[in-house]
Protein backbone atom coordinates (compact mmCIF):
# COMPACT_ATOMS: atom_id res chain seq x y z
CA UNK A 1 0.00 0.00 0.00
CA UNK A 2 1.00 3.64 -0.29
CA UNK A 3 3.58 4.56 2.32
CA UNK A 4 2.17 6.87 5.01
CA UNK A 5 3.08 10.48 4.23
CA UNK A 6 5.17 12.51 6.63
CA UNK A 7 3.31 14.90 8.89
CA UNK A 8 2.39 17.93 6.77
CA UNK A 9 4.49 20.98 7.28
CA UNK A 10 2.73 24.28 7.78
CA UNK A 11 2.10 26.00 4.45
CA UNK A 12 1.51 29.74 4.78
CA UNK A 13 -2.03 30.94 4.16
CA UNK A 14 -0.50 33.69 2.00
CA UNK A 15 0.32 32.41 -1.48
CA UNK A 16 2.89 35.18 -2.00
CA UNK A 17 5.74 32.74 -1.19
CA UNK A 18 5.04 30.74 -4.37
CA UNK A 19 8.01 30.98 -6.74
CA UNK A 20 7.40 27.96 -8.96
CA UNK A 21 4.09 26.44 -10.08
CA UNK A 22 3.52 23.26 -12.07
CA UNK A 23 0.46 22.17 -14.04
CA UNK A 24 0.20 18.50 -14.93
CA UNK A 25 -1.28 15.05 -14.41
CA UNK A 26 -1.22 13.82 -10.79
CA UNK A 27 -1.01 10.02 -10.84
CA UNK A 28 -0.53 7.21 -8.36
CA UNK A 29 2.43 5.16 -9.64
CA UNK A 30 2.12 1.36 -9.36
CA UNK A 31 5.69 0.13 -9.68
CA UNK A 32 6.95 -3.43 -10.18
CA UNK A 33 10.08 -5.20 -11.41
CA UNK A 34 8.88 -7.38 -14.30
CA UNK A 35 10.07 -9.93 -16.82
CA UNK A 36 10.28 -9.37 -20.59
CA UNK A 37 7.13 -11.43 -21.19
CA UNK A 38 5.12 -8.91 -19.12
CA UNK A 39 6.38 -6.06 -21.29
CA UNK A 40 5.59 -8.07 -24.43
CA UNK A 41 2.09 -8.96 -23.21
CA UNK A 42 1.12 -5.29 -22.83
CA UNK A 43 3.06 -3.95 -25.80
CA UNK A 44 5.29 -1.88 -23.52
CA UNK A 45 8.83 -0.79 -24.46
CA UNK A 46 11.60 0.16 -22.07
CA UNK A 47 12.57 3.84 -21.94
CA UNK A 48 9.12 4.77 -23.26
CA UNK A 49 5.80 6.11 -22.03
CA UNK A 50 2.32 5.57 -23.47
CA UNK A 51 -1.27 6.32 -22.59
CA UNK A 52 -3.32 3.30 -21.56
CA UNK A 53 -5.84 1.92 -24.06
CA UNK A 54 -8.76 -0.40 -23.33
CA UNK A 55 -6.44 -3.41 -23.68
CA UNK A 56 -4.32 -2.11 -20.80
CA UNK A 57 -7.12 -1.70 -18.26
CA UNK A 58 -6.75 -5.21 -16.73
CA UNK A 59 -3.00 -4.69 -16.35
CA UNK A 60 -3.07 -2.74 -13.09
CA UNK A 61 -4.98 -5.39 -11.13
CA UNK A 62 -3.05 -8.24 -12.75
CA UNK A 63 0.25 -6.59 -11.89
CA UNK A 64 -0.74 -6.25 -8.24
CA UNK A 65 -1.74 -9.93 -8.14
CA UNK A 66 1.30 -11.38 -9.91
CA UNK A 67 4.16 -9.16 -8.68
CA UNK A 68 5.21 -7.31 -5.53
CA UNK A 69 4.16 -3.72 -6.25
CA UNK A 70 4.96 -0.38 -4.68
CA UNK A 71 2.48 2.50 -4.66
CA UNK A 72 4.17 5.88 -5.08
CA UNK A 73 2.71 9.38 -5.34
CA UNK A 74 3.71 10.50 -8.82
CA UNK A 75 3.02 12.08 -12.16
CA UNK A 76 5.91 13.65 -14.08
CA UNK A 77 5.22 17.29 -13.26
CA UNK A 78 4.25 16.66 -9.67
CA UNK A 79 7.48 14.69 -9.12
CA UNK A 80 9.54 17.56 -10.55
CA UNK A 81 7.77 20.10 -8.34
CA UNK A 82 8.32 17.97 -5.22
CA UNK A 83 12.05 17.74 -5.97
CA UNK A 84 12.19 21.50 -6.59
CA UNK A 85 10.43 22.07 -3.28
CA UNK A 86 13.05 19.92 -1.54
CA UNK A 87 15.80 22.05 -3.10
CA UNK A 88 14.10 25.37 -2.27
CA UNK A 89 13.36 24.32 1.31
CA UNK A 90 10.80 26.85 2.52
CA UNK A 91 7.31 25.26 2.62
CA UNK A 92 4.96 26.85 0.11
CA UNK A 93 7.73 27.89 -2.29
CA UNK A 94 6.10 25.67 -4.92
CA UNK A 95 2.57 24.79 -5.99
CA UNK A 96 1.10 22.08 -8.16
CA UNK A 97 -2.21 22.07 -10.05
CA UNK A 98 -3.97 19.11 -11.67
CA UNK A 99 -7.10 16.98 -11.34
CA UNK A 100 -7.65 14.04 -8.98
CA UNK A 101 -10.72 12.09 -7.95
CA UNK A 102 -12.58 12.50 -4.69
CA UNK A 103 -11.17 9.22 -3.38
CA UNK A 104 -8.53 7.69 -1.12
CA UNK A 105 -5.79 7.80 -3.75
CA UNK A 106 -6.46 11.48 -4.37
CA UNK A 107 -6.27 12.16 -0.63
CA UNK A 108 -2.98 10.25 -0.43
CA UNK A 109 -1.51 12.27 -3.28
CA UNK A 110 -2.51 15.54 -1.63
CA UNK A 111 -1.13 14.46 1.74
CA UNK A 112 2.17 13.41 0.16
CA UNK A 113 2.55 16.69 -1.73
CA UNK A 114 1.66 18.86 1.24
CA UNK A 115 3.88 16.73 3.47
CA UNK A 116 6.76 17.76 1.21
CA UNK A 117 5.80 21.44 1.51
CA UNK A 118 4.11 21.73 -1.91
CA UNK A 119 0.87 23.70 -2.07
CA UNK A 120 -1.31 21.10 -3.82
CA UNK A 121 -4.21 22.98 -5.39
CA UNK A 122 -6.10 20.13 -7.05
CA UNK A 123 -9.31 20.22 -9.00
CA UNK A 124 -11.31 17.30 -7.56
CA UNK A 125 -13.61 15.39 -9.88
CA UNK A 126 -16.64 13.93 -8.11
CA UNK A 127 -17.12 10.91 -10.38
CA UNK A 128 -13.82 9.93 -12.02
CA UNK A 129 -11.17 8.08 -9.97
CA UNK A 130 -7.65 9.36 -9.45
CA UNK A 131 -5.31 8.42 -12.29
CA UNK A 132 -2.71 5.66 -12.08
CA UNK A 133 0.50 4.84 -13.91
CA UNK A 134 2.06 1.40 -14.24
CA UNK A 135 5.85 1.60 -13.88
CA UNK A 136 7.32 -1.58 -15.37
CA UNK A 137 10.98 -1.89 -14.37
CA UNK A 138 13.49 -4.24 -16.00
CA UNK A 139 17.28 -4.08 -15.94
CA UNK A 140 17.40 -0.57 -14.55
CA UNK A 141 15.11 0.82 -17.25
CA UNK A 142 11.38 1.43 -17.09
CA UNK A 143 8.25 1.62 -19.20
CA UNK A 144 5.30 3.82 -18.21
CA UNK A 145 1.65 3.11 -19.02
CA UNK A 146 -0.56 5.91 -17.75
CA UNK A 147 -4.30 5.61 -17.15
CA UNK A 148 -5.09 9.30 -16.70
CA UNK A 149 -8.69 8.93 -15.42
CA UNK A 150 -9.38 12.08 -13.36
CA UNK A 151 -6.13 13.72 -14.51
CA UNK A 152 -7.69 13.82 -17.98
CA UNK A 153 -10.62 15.88 -16.65
CA UNK A 154 -8.77 19.10 -15.83
CA UNK A 155 -10.66 22.15 -17.08
CA UNK A 156 -9.54 25.71 -17.71
CA UNK A 157 -12.43 26.91 -15.52
CA UNK A 158 -10.40 25.69 -12.51
CA UNK A 159 -7.39 27.65 -13.75
CA UNK A 160 -9.59 30.75 -13.86
CA UNK A 161 -10.62 30.52 -10.18
CA UNK A 162 -9.37 33.16 -7.76
CA UNK A 163 -7.22 30.64 -5.84
CA UNK A 164 -5.30 29.46 -8.89
CA UNK A 165 -4.96 32.95 -10.31
CA UNK A 166 -3.41 34.10 -7.05
CA UNK A 167 -0.85 31.27 -7.22
CA UNK A 168 -0.06 31.95 -10.89
CA UNK A 169 0.32 35.68 -10.22
CA UNK A 170 2.74 35.02 -7.35
CA UNK A 171 4.92 32.51 -9.24
CA UNK A 172 7.91 33.57 -11.34
CA UNK A 173 8.38 30.22 -13.08
CA UNK A 174 5.78 27.90 -14.67
CA UNK A 175 6.64 24.27 -15.45
CA UNK A 176 4.61 21.76 -17.46
CA UNK A 177 5.36 18.29 -18.75
CA UNK A 178 4.35 17.63 -22.34
CA UNK A 179 1.90 15.05 -20.99
CA UNK A 180 -0.43 17.93 -20.03
CA UNK A 181 -0.79 18.70 -23.76
CA UNK A 182 -3.03 15.63 -23.95
CA UNK A 183 -5.35 17.15 -21.34
CA UNK A 184 -5.70 20.95 -21.49
CA UNK A 185 -3.80 22.92 -24.15
CA UNK A 186 -6.09 25.94 -23.48
CA UNK A 187 -4.79 26.08 -19.91
CA UNK A 188 -1.19 25.90 -21.13
CA UNK A 189 -1.78 28.67 -23.66
CA UNK A 190 -3.41 30.83 -20.98
CA UNK A 191 -0.36 30.23 -18.76
CA UNK A 192 1.94 31.08 -21.66
CA UNK A 193 0.18 34.36 -22.36
CA UNK A 194 0.43 35.35 -18.69
CA UNK A 195 4.13 34.46 -18.60
CA UNK A 196 4.90 36.40 -21.80
CA UNK A 197 2.94 39.47 -20.66
CA UNK A 198 4.57 39.54 -17.22
CA UNK A 199 8.07 38.58 -18.46
CA UNK A 200 8.22 35.43 -16.37
CA UNK A 201 9.67 32.02 -17.32
CA UNK A 202 7.78 29.12 -18.94
CA UNK A 203 9.45 25.68 -18.95
CA UNK A 204 8.15 22.75 -21.02
CA UNK A 205 9.33 19.15 -21.08
CA UNK A 206 8.70 17.08 -24.23
CA UNK A 207 8.13 14.10 -21.88
CA UNK A 208 7.74 11.26 -24.40
CA UNK A 209 8.17 10.56 -28.13
CA UNK A 210 4.41 10.07 -28.58
CA UNK A 211 3.81 13.71 -27.64
CA UNK A 212 5.79 14.82 -30.68
CA UNK A 213 4.20 12.14 -32.88
CA UNK A 214 0.52 12.50 -32.02
CA UNK A 215 0.16 15.85 -30.24
CA UNK A 216 2.27 17.99 -32.55
CA UNK A 217 -0.41 20.65 -33.11
CA UNK A 218 -1.02 21.33 -29.39
CA UNK A 219 2.75 21.31 -28.87
CA UNK A 220 3.25 23.91 -31.58
CA UNK A 221 0.45 26.05 -30.15
CA UNK A 222 2.35 26.28 -26.84
CA UNK A 223 5.90 26.59 -28.22
CA UNK A 224 5.75 30.39 -28.80
CA UNK A 225 5.52 30.85 -25.02
CA UNK A 226 8.28 28.41 -24.05
CA UNK A 227 11.47 29.89 -22.57
CA UNK A 228 13.19 26.57 -21.77
CA UNK A 229 12.52 23.29 -23.62
CA UNK A 230 13.62 20.03 -21.97
CA UNK A 231 13.79 16.50 -23.36
CA UNK A 232 15.87 13.35 -23.59
CA UNK A 233 17.62 12.31 -26.78
CA UNK A 234 14.79 10.09 -28.07
CA UNK A 235 12.18 12.80 -27.48
CA UNK A 236 14.35 15.44 -29.13
CA UNK A 237 14.98 13.17 -32.12
CA UNK A 238 11.25 12.55 -32.49
CA UNK A 239 10.59 16.30 -32.32
CA UNK A 240 13.15 16.81 -35.06
CA UNK A 241 11.52 14.16 -37.24
CA UNK A 242 8.07 15.68 -36.69
CA UNK A 243 9.38 19.10 -37.70
CA UNK A 244 11.34 17.83 -40.72
CA UNK A 245 14.70 18.81 -39.20
CA UNK A 246 16.22 15.34 -38.96
CA UNK A 247 17.38 13.66 -35.77
CA UNK A 248 20.76 15.28 -35.03
CA UNK A 249 20.40 16.70 -31.51
CA UNK A 250 22.51 19.81 -32.09
CA UNK A 251 20.47 20.69 -35.17
CA UNK A 252 17.17 20.07 -33.37
CA UNK A 253 18.29 22.18 -30.41
CA UNK A 254 19.26 25.13 -32.58
CA UNK A 255 16.10 24.90 -34.71
CA UNK A 256 13.88 24.68 -31.62
CA UNK A 257 15.62 27.67 -30.06
CA UNK A 258 15.06 29.68 -33.25
CA UNK A 259 11.28 29.06 -33.41
CA UNK A 260 9.14 32.23 -32.98
CA UNK A 261 8.84 33.37 -29.37
CA UNK A 262 5.95 35.50 -28.14
CA UNK A 263 7.97 37.58 -25.68
CA UNK A 264 10.84 38.06 -28.11
CA UNK A 265 13.57 37.93 -25.50
CA UNK A 266 15.45 36.43 -23.80
CA UNK A 267 16.16 33.77 -26.46
CA UNK A 268 14.73 30.29 -25.90
CA UNK A 269 16.98 27.77 -24.18
CA UNK A 270 17.03 24.02 -24.77
CA UNK A 271 18.26 21.17 -22.57
CA UNK A 272 18.45 17.77 -24.28
CA UNK A 273 20.02 14.88 -22.36
Image (spheres, helix red, strand yellow):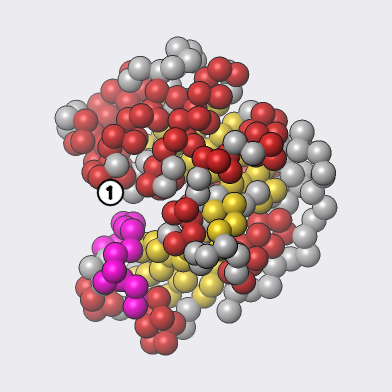
| Res 14 visible | yes
User: Which of 129/42 is in front?
Assistant: 129
Magenta highlight range: 45-59
Residue found at x 65% / y 59%: 110
Residue found at x 29% / y 42%: 215
- Say whether residue 166 is left or right of residue 179: right
Q: Is residue 69 above or below residue 45?
A: below
Q: Is residue 271 above or below residue 3?
A: above
Query: Does 47 lie within the magenta span?
Result: yes
Screen quadrant of the C terminus: top left
- Say whether residue 91 is left or right of residue 235: right
User: Which of 272/19 is in front?
Assistant: 19
Q: Quadrant of residue 72?
A: bottom right
**Label 1 belongs to which residue?**
210
Q: Quadrant of residue 49?
A: bottom left
* The furthest residue to the top: 264
| Res 254 visible | no
* The furthest residue to the bottom: 65
Q: Is residue 117 above or below residue 229?
A: below
Query: Does 197 lie within the magenta span?
Result: no
Instruction: Give coordinates of residue 97: x percent, y percent.
Output: 59, 46
Instruction: Give coordinates of residue 90: x percent, y percent.
Output: 77, 44
Q: How many marks?
A: 1
Q: Check disc 1: other Cα within 10 Å, few if <14, some if 14-19, many if 20+.
A: some
Residue found at x 50% / y 45%: 155
Residue found at x 46% / y 66%: 132
Instruction: Give coordinates of residue 73: x percent, y percent.
Output: 57, 63
Instruction: Give coordinates of residue 197: x percent, y percent.
Output: 56, 17
Element at badge 1? Answer: helix
Amino acid sequence: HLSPPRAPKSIPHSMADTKLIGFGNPLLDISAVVEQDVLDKWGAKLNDAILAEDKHKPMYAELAESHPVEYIAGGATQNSIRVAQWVMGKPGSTAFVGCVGKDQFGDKLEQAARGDGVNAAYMKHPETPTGTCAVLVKGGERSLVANLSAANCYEISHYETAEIQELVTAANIVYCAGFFLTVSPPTMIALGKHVAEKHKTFCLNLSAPFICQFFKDPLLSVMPYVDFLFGNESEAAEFGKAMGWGEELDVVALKAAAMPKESGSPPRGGVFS
